[in-house]
Amino acid sequence: MEDEIAEVANKSFMLYKISPLLRFHHTPFPDRELSLGKHICGRLRLKDTTRNTHTKKNEVYLGDLTDLRIEPLNFDNIQLYDPDVLPLKITIEIMLYKDYRSVLHTFFLLPSPYIPPNEKLAEEKTFYPLLLAKTTSRIRSGLLSWFENQFFATSTQLFISPSVMEEMVHIWIESIHNLPDEDAFEEIPDSMIRPPLIMEYKTDINDLSDIKISIEQHEAKAICKKIPERKMFLEAFQEHILKTTGVRIRSFIFHRVSNSLAILRQDGSVKINGHAYKVYAVQLIQSWINMAAKKVYER
């Protein structure tokens, strides 16, 4: 099966964490699609045009459900607790009569790397701790309420911890040290070599504005040459900022990080660069899955 991880690139998503879904894997895909379609149509007063369904007399519809699919995907090197529990793509397309414009809503359910310890009735549950959502608030609410009503799973927005923001910096450092040489035959896209590392911090101090720090790739490599290990880059850089400016940035809220791999915000907004090497894109996604699993299963 072809690796389909490129499906999540060049799209902006919000992250949500989801508790275990009861008897989700016991439900065949066509039945899941039918159930979700009925739920979405009922909440939003839509006519289901994806199948031959009975239209209620005198029913007033606000639009059409034109497409709904739940499909398994193959993401190479994403850790799976069960080889049969694959990442899922949920596609919902709706056309509202007010403007007759079709809008596509896309979700990705990503499985846990492990079964939560001491989980009761684990054999009856499916573990998808992370949801990536590219959608409107109404459709997102419809999907999340379906998870809750049908599978007794609760869902909430996933806020990014500082350690995961820092891990993204470490992954970026490794990536820039593994780019082909400039004289190599392989052409490197500008979007992989030009974007600097940008870290933004919220101070919540009236007399001190928010802090935005930018460092070019060649500057980051120069710092790495002066330290024993590349994983110490962020610590060394923060120490440099402290010595030169007197600002201890670790004491502030790590709000946003961006580089040639991706953009990640504290509120769970993410976007992966379409040119990012797959191995590093996988590491980023896996770090988000691990964080979601820890927050949901290890409370």
Image (cartoon, grey):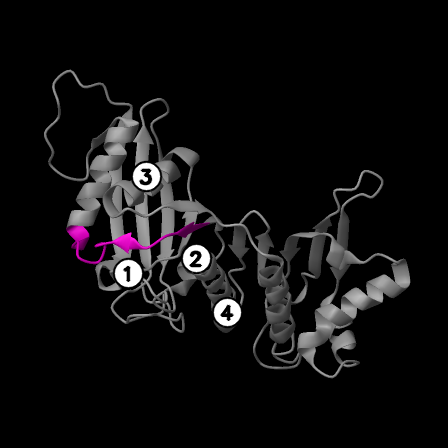
Please state the extent of the stretch shown in magenta in the rendering: 16-30
Alpha carbon separation for disc pair 3 and 2 = 23 Å
Which class describes the residues within 10 Å of circle 3: few (<14), some (14-19), or many (20+)? many
Amino acid type shown at disc 2? Val
Which residue extends farthest bottom? 228
Which class describes the residues within 10 Å of circle 4: few (<14), some (14-19), or many (20+)? some
Question: Residue 120: which disc?
Answer: 1
Question: Residue 172: which disc?
Answer: none
Q: In the displayed structure, would residue 256 be above or below residue 279?
A: above
- Ranked by sequence position, the earlier of labels 1 and 3 is 1
**Residue ID for mark 4:** 283
Residue 136 quadrant = top left
**Residue ID for mark 3:** 145
Amino acid type shown at disc 4? Gln
- Ranked by sequence position, the earlier of labels 2 and 4 is 2
- Ranked by sequence position, the earlier of labels 4 and 1 is 1
Circles 3, 2 touching at the beta carbon (< 8 Å): no
> Is label 2 in a helix, a strand or a loop?
helix
Task: State the count of labels.
Answer: 4
> Is label 4 in a helix, a strand or a loop?
helix
Give the label, 3 or 2, closer to the camera. 3
> Is label 3 in a helix, a strand or a loop?
helix
Alpha carbon separation for disc pair 1 and 2 = 33 Å
Amino acid type shown at disc 1? Lys
Q: Residue at x 85, y 40 (%)?
A: 207
Which class describes the residues within 10 Å of circle 1: few (<14), some (14-19), or many (20+)? few
**Residue ID for mark 2:** 8
Q: Is residue 19 magenta?
A: yes
> Is label 1 in a helix, a strand or a loop?
loop
Alpha carbon separation for disc pair 2 and 4 = 14 Å
Residue in the foreground of this view, choosing between 290 and 41 = 290
